[in-house]
């Protein structure tokens, strides 16, 4: 179903790809946009248990794309070191493919939002829980079940500097 990586020697182990996805604070989500154009948008996320979680406004291009076609991709770049004299870049990145679901169950929404709050505002959980309740009509929570995840590293980094 999913393509194999063309440069298999540069593929990083699954555990390392998951670690990169878990440690990144933002990535780029691509959805099926208007008139067949892809729509890619930066998203702050949490990755846990094989799933990505993020929140969104209740309406907009990203959410319309997800509702139109729940298949998405998500990319994170954890290292991007341009090497001008060598005409190359030392990079480490991951791409995830999955199915997005706008959460409707209040307990699932609360769980997703608390994961995000714990990640981005540790030590402020009481304030976060209040904000989640007070602003509930202004956002949606989205879960992406990851179906395929690959990571790739520049050949120059393959034996040094693990993520």
Image (cartoon, rainbow, N blue to C red):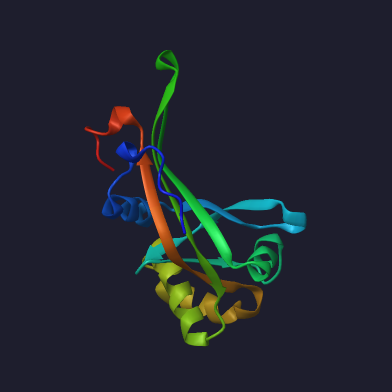
Left/right of residue 80 with respect to residue 104 in the rendered view = left
- At x 48% / y 49%, what residue is drawn? 75
Task: Residue at the far front: name it.
Answer: 1
Q: Residue furthest right?
A: 35
What residue is rendered at 50% in x and 54% in y?
74
The residue sitting at 38% across, 50% down in the picture is 150
Q: Is residue 137 above or below residue 47?
A: below
Counting labels gives 0
Q: Position of residue 8 (x, y in %)?
A: 34, 40
| Residue 34 placement, left or right of 131 | right
Where is residue 107 shown, x and y percent of the image? Answer: 47, 86
- Which image quadrant is residue 43 in? bottom right
Residue at point 55%, 82% (across, down): 133
Residue that extends furthest to the top in the rendered view of this protein: 85
Taking the image as drawn, is residue 95 in sight?
Answer: yes
The front one of 13 and 76 is 13
Q: Where does the C terminus fall, quadrant-wise?
A: top left
Residue 45 in percent (x, y) is at 47, 60
Residue 103 quadrant: bottom right
**Up-down relation of residue 16 to residue 32 (above or below):** above
Compared with residue 87, is residue 154 higher up or lower down, i.e. above or below? below
Residue 121 in sight in this render: no
| Relative image position of residue 89 (x, y in whole percent) | 42, 27
Quarter-of-image position of residue 71: bottom right
In the image, farthest residue toward the bottom: 106
Q: Eyeballing the image, is 126 above or below 116?
A: below
């Amino acid at each position: 179903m999913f393509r194999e990586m063309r440069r298999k020697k540069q593929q990083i182990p699954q555990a390392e790809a998951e670690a990169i996805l878990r440690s990144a604070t933002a990535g780029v989500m691509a959805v099926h946009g208007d008139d067949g154009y892809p729509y890619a948008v930066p998203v702050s996320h949490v990755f846990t248990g094989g799933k990505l979680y993020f929140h969104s406004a209740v309406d907009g291009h990203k959410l319309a794309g997800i509702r139109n076609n729940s298949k998405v991709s998500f990319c994170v770049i954890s290292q991007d070191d341009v090497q001008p004299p060598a005409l190359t870049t030392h990079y480490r990145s991951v791409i995830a493919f999955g199915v997005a679901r706008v959460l409707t169950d209040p307990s699932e929404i609360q769980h997703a939002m608390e994961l995000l709050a714990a990640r981005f505002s540790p030590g402020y959980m009481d304030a976060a829980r209040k904000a989640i309740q007070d602003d509930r009509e202004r956002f949606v929570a989205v879960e992406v079940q990851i179906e395929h995840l690959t990571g790739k590293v520049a050949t120059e980094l393959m034996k040094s500097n693990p993520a």
